[in-house]
Amino acid sequence: MKVTDIGDLEIIAKDIRRNIVKTVYNAKSGHPGGSLSCADILTVLYFNQMNINPQDPKAEGRDRFVLSKGHCSPALYSTLAKRGYFDEKELDTFRKIGSNLQGHPDMNKIPGVDMTSGSLGQGLSVANGMALSSKMGSMGYRVYCLLGDGEIEEGQVWEAAMTSAKYKLDNLCVIVDNNNLQIDGNIKDVKGLNKIEEKFESFGFKVIPVDGNNIEQLIDGFERAKMTKGMPTAIIARTVKGKGVSFMENKPEWHGKAPNEEQFKQAMNELN
């Protein structure tokens, strides 16, 4: 099922945002800010771009996705449920004892999760391995890896980036959720991180900057990535942390806390 209508994709993204807020509210914990910022990215990947089949989640030729910023699992779970990998009712069990939907995604428990993640900085290394495997086995699948901009302060990310370029992994697409905030504040204040596009370019990537909350720009960016040959691609997606909920937008305190009842009602009203 490939959704091509921009309006339909925007509706799907809003449904995913509603489920993100519900999931975190019901659990009384979680990471809403970065989950909301990447909702459009996941919508485009899972409903427009990736070669996947929820009825056959382990198909060898499927495209792979690695959520390197694993704490934003509410976004991935809501997307997978919307796409039909499991019943949306299961979202109510998020972070509950005995639930498959842990705070960070587990590939051994959840259909559609290609890699267990959570320890920041490791996702691109795994994605490299997947992309290499695809090339060595002439499998033809593509690999997508979503990184947080705060996460790329980790040194392992740049070691992995050198590997991506060395092996000319043109079937690899890195997406940086560039919302400019991390748990302790603005990324420029925490670590002095800037010129993200230039950094990836200097590491041998084809760099495509987009508005990461704009469905049309995201589709165009992913299509351009598919046409890139001989080098990996990095889509630098400028987003708004907490996108769609006014009191969460661009507020670092919503990196990792749940709304109370009044805030939940306001958020749902806005998303409706």
Image (spheres, rainbow, N blue to C red):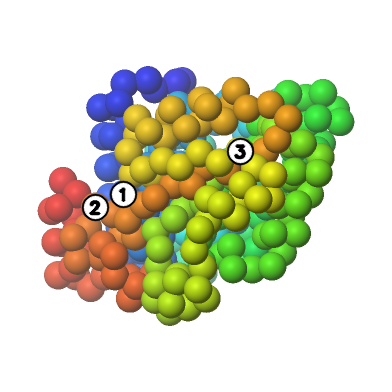
Q: Where is residue 121 in the image (x, y as percent from the top left)?
A: 65, 63
Q: Where is residue 225 in the image (x, y as percent from the top left)?
A: 57, 30
Instruction: Judge by depth and name the residue closer to the eye, 220 or 267.
Output: 220
Question: What residue is disc 3 on?
Answer: 206
Left or right: residue 70 versus residue 216 is right
Q: Earlier in the sequence, mark 3 or mark 1?
A: 1
Mark 3 or mark 2, whichever is nearer to me: 3
Measured along the vertical axis of the image, is residue 81 above or below residue 35?
above
Which amino acid type is shown beneath numbered disc 1?
Arg
Which amino acid type is shown beneath numbered disc 2?
Gly
Question: What residue is disc 1 on?
Answer: 17
**How dense is the environment of label 1, judged by Cα within 10 Å: few (below 14), some, or many (20 and up)?**
many
Q: Say how many tags the image has.
A: 3
Q: Is mark 2 on a helix, strand or loop?
A: loop
Measured along the vertical axis of the image, is residue 215 above or below residue 88?
above
Mark 2 or mark 1, whichever is nearer to me: 2
**Gap between marks 3 and 2 measured at Cα:** 30 Å
Return the mark for residue 244. Answer: 2
Q: Residue at x 35, y 30 (%)?
A: 216
Which amino acid type is shown beneath numbered disc 3?
Lys
